[in-house]
Structure formats: C-alpha cells, structure tokens
C-alpha cells in the first residue's frame, strides 16, 4: 500500500496517495513510511499543521528517521514563514493600510493555501477597500473549504 501511495504521490495525486497511506496505516498504524508519506502529501496540499502531526507520529516510532526529521523541518519552516507574512499583513490591516496588507496575505497563501488567518484577513482587507464582491467570494470559499 505504501508503494502505491508513493506512486500516486510522485504523480502529484496527493488525495489518492493519502488514501493508500491510510490503507497501509489501517493494517499497521506504526508504519513510519506511511506516516511520513501521508505527512508529505498533506504538506503538498498546504496542510502543514496536520502534516507535522504525522511526522511526529513517525518520529515517535523512530526518533532517528531522517526523512521525517527533514520533512518536519521543511513543514515547520513553511508554517513559520506563512505566519510571519500574516503577522505583517495584520499590522498593515490594523493601521488601515488594506492595499499594503493584501500582498502579504497573498505571500502567506502562496506558502500555505489553506491558511485560515490569511484567507480571512485578505477577505477583511478586500472588504475594507470596498471590493465587496471579491470579499464575499473569498469568504464563501473559506467557509466551504473548511466545513468538513
């Protein structure tokens, strides 16, 4: 199952890869390769926080598993970078500089497309600029993206 998950992962089909990693984990919940693979697929979908949880599970099984160590470090750096851009955007937003805030929200979303703070903040900044249609579309997308 892990090999099939890896094959789908290498094709960029992360959703299908996760399904195979889940099948492998149903059989063996301590399969560090499936845990790391699922973490990588989640990371590539922009879900760094959940990816880190899977890397941590793999590292709990084998603290010296270098792939999981490297992959977790990469995900942590992406999460930190996205958070730094959101913080900068929020500073501009708080000053009422909505036009200057939006590019920083966009930079955060380029790193982590599912960053709720960046999506919500960009919607608020668009609203503040009077771009109500774009704000509504973004907020609608936000509410439906995370309702599951």
Image: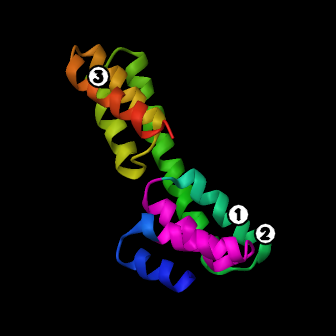
For residue 147, which numbered disc appears in the image?
none
Whole-percent x and y of residue 20?
53, 74
Q: Which residues are magenta?
A: 17-46
Depth order, front residue of 137/56: 137
Q: Quadrant of residue 22?
A: bottom right
Q: What is the quadrant of residue 52 in the picture?
A: bottom right
Which type of secondary structure does the marked residue at label 2 adopt? Answer: helix
Q: Residue 139: where, in percent of width, then height?
A: 35, 27
Determine crowd level at label 3: few under 14, some 14-19, many 20+ residues with C-alpha closer than 10 A. some
Q: Which residue is mark 2?
A: 60
The mark nearer the N terminus, 3 or 1, is 1
Q: Secondary structure at mark 1?
A: helix
Q: CA distance from mark 2 to mark 1?
A: 6 Å
The tally of labels here is: 3
In-front residue for pair 11/89: 11
Q: Is residue 70 visible?
A: no
Q: Which residue is mark 3?
A: 136
Tell me the residue at 44%/26% (across/down).
90
Assign a secondary structure to mark 3.
helix
Q: Residues within 10 Å of mark 2 (few under 14, many from 20)?
A: few
Task: Give the mark nearer the N terminus: 2 vs 3.
Answer: 2
Q: Give the vertical position of 120 relative to 66 (above or below).
A: above
In the image: residue 75, left or right of residue 66: left
72 w.r.t. 7: above or below: above
Q: Position of residue 48 (x, y in %)?
A: 53, 54
**Proximity of marks 2 and 1: CB atoms separated by less than 8 Å:** yes
Q: Residue at x 49, y 55 (%)?
A: 78
| Residue pointed to by mark 1 | 56
């Amino acid at each position: 199952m892990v090999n099939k998950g890896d094959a789908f992962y290498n094709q960029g089909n992360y959703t299908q890869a996760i399904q195979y990693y889940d099948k492998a984990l149903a059989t063996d919940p301590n399969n560090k390769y499936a845990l790391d693979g699922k973490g990588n697929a989640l990371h590539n979908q922009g879900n760094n926080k959940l990816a880190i949880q899977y890397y941590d599970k793999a590292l709990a099984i084998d603290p010296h598993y270098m792939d999981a160590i490297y992959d977790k470090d990469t995900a942590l750096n992406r999460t930190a970078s996205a958070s730094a851009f959101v913080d900068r955007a929020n500073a501009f937003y708080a000053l009422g500089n909505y036009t200057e805030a939006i590019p920083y929200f966009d930079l955060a979303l380029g790193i982590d497309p599912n960053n709720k703070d960046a999506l919500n903040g960009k919607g608020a900044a668009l609203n503040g600029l009077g771009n109500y249609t774009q704000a509504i579309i973004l907020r609608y997308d936000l509410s439906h993206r995370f309702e599951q």
